[in-house]
Every structure is written in C-alpha cells, then in structure tokens.
Image (cartoon, rainbow, N blue to C red):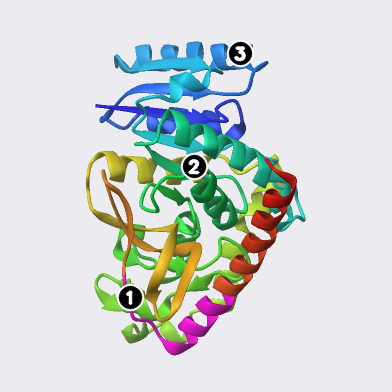
Amino acid sequence: MAKVTIIGASGHVGRYTALAVSYIPYVDEIVLFGREGSEEVLHGLACDLHDSFAARGTTLEAVFSTSPKDLENSDIIILTSGVPRRDGQDRMDLAHANARLVAQMAAMVGWYAPKSLFLIVSNPVDVMTAVALKYSGMKANQVFGLGTHLDSMRLKWNIAHFFGVHVSEVHTRIIGEHGDSMVPLWSATTIGGISIQNLPRFEQLPEEQIMKNVKTAGSHIIRRIGATVYGPGDAISTIVRTILGNENRILTVSALISSEIKDVADVCIGVPAKLNRDGVFPLAITIDEKEVEEFRTSADKIRAVTKEVLDKLDTDGC
C-alpha cells in the first residue's frame, strides 16, 4: 500500500486530485499538504473526503498538514501549487512567478522524502520539472511532470470523435512542450491497430482544427469556469495508478531526456516514457523527420526559458 502526498491540496486541481487518487486501490493514505494558514481549509477537505470514503465503504485515511516532516515516507508527492493560468495567458507567462515556489517545495521534498517519486503539475510544467529536478537533488527518473499526457488524451478524444470509434481504439500521443509548440505524432497514430493513414477518411481529417482544439482546450475551460479541474485531476490519477500498480505502461510525461529522439538532449520535455514503481524512463523512438524538426524547435523553446528561469533563481536565490 502507498502514501500519496498532494502539495497544494486546497487548490482546485489539488482537491479533485485527492478525490481521484482515493479511488486507486493501492493507496491507503493521502496527505493534504499546504502552506501555514491553510489549516482550516485542509481540515475541512479531509473531513469531506472521509465522508466520501464512508459512503464508499473504504478505510482509506486522509490527513492534513503544513509540516514538512509529514512528507516523510511518501511514495509519490504531487506538486499542484502555483499561480494559476488566467484566460489569455500563455503557460510560459507563469515561469518566473512559479519558479521560486517550485524551487522551495522541491528542496523541501528532496530533504524530507528523497526516495519518493515527485510529480510536477505546476505550469509551465516542462520548465518547472527542470527546476524541481535541480533543487530537489533527486535522480532524473524520480522527478517528472504531467507534460503532454493530458494533451495526448485530448487529441485521442478528437480523433475518436471524428472517426466515430470508441476512444480506447485510438492510440496516439503528443510530444514536446505542454503549450503552443506541442507536436502531434500523426506518424505513430493508429485506430484499432491500423495506421490512421490507411483509413478511408484520413484525407478528410481536419488536423489543423483538431490541434487548435487541443491547444486551446485549457483556455476555453478557464474562460468558462475559471480553472481546469477534472481533466488534469484524472490525468494525474492515471499516472499515479500506473506507477503504484507497477504497470510499465507508456505515458507521455515531461522528463529529462538524453537523445532518445535524435540528438535532442538535456531538457525536460514531454516524451513517451515507461512508468513503474522505480520511476519514469523515456523511450528511444523513431518518428518522421518533420516531427523531429518540430520537436527540436519545441525543445529549443523550453531550453531557453529554462535557462533564463534557472539563471534568475541562481542570481536572486529561492
């Protein structure tokens, strides 16, 4: 059984993540972690979750804390804290605002729970994953971000909707930045095991419109209800379930790469990776040359912002 800690549990994503994670059979303790001063909210959330557990007949335990010592012995720590994206903002706009907080939280996690796996959700997630990796002092396979996992699921839904098939029949993924420079892998997309390019309606597939839908999905939701909640929460829960179940599934998360895709290396970016109890392991893949070039452009963008953010943290301190 496992202990899962959610840093930033009082926020929209943190709250729903706690509920979603509570359905994972391998979890027996959830720690709702927040900053000092948030005790009342965290206490209320813990009580509400216990009511949910009672209704479901489960003996899962939810505790709340603002003490770093309670991070100890966590199997997975999920960081959802940060300045939320507003309508009209690019995720990269949040880089400097969130970097100091992520650095502080990462240093705390590295000190109190150095053997845990550390999942970053704070945006821009690729840059924040690099910040967390540096300031936690943990190994590369232990620190990873939500990356393009949710984007890949959004692409999957759009393709299934167009072809009129069950979403489980679609296998596809998006790599690169969780942002405007994301790269859909059309060359690796299949439906029912058949390459999408071999299907009768492929020539009518509105690729540009579908990618516009995927890229603007978050902003559309934020404009209407103020925050994305259920999509990120269930995407996070899927990753946690995959790891705790030691499933060795391949999901597309943000991780430090070392030339798994051509010669692109030394950047935290969304890539296919095998996930299990030992952490996250990027896979070497071959894709179309056009996709390689788009991926390289995406990596260059992330690398430049990451350097700028880390340099500022080094200068200003965290």
Q: Position of residue 316 (x, y in %)?
A: 74, 46
Q: Is residue 255 left or right of residue 107?
A: left
In terms of sequence position, does the residue under pointer 2 or pointer 3 come before the other? 3
Give me the disc on residue 136. Answer: 2
Nearer the observer, 27 or 318: 318
Q: Position of residue 6 (x, y in %)?
A: 48, 30
Callout in the foreground (2, 3): 2
Identify which residue is drawn at 46% across, 82% down. 292
Give the tally of numbered discs.
3
Q: Is residue 11 left or right of residue 245?
A: right
Which secondary structure is most common in the magenta stretch?
helix
User: At label 1, which amino acid type do we have?
Assistant: Ile
User: At label 3, which amino acid type do we have?
Assistant: Glu
Give the residue pinned by disc 1.
285
* Quadrant for the N terminus in the image: top left
Characterize the local packing of mark 2: few (<14), some (14-19) or many (20 or more) Cα atoms within 10 angstroms: many
**Residues in magenta, as a range:** 284-298
Asked whether residue 184 appears in the rendered view, the answer is: yes
Q: Is residue 24 above or below residue 223?
A: above
Q: Is residue 284 left or right of residue 315?
A: left
Give me the disc on residue 39. Answer: 3
- Does 317 appear in magenta? no
Question: Quadrant of the rendered structure where residue 80 is?
Answer: top right
Nearer the observer, 134 or 247: 134
Q: Position of residue 242 (x, y in %)?
A: 29, 45
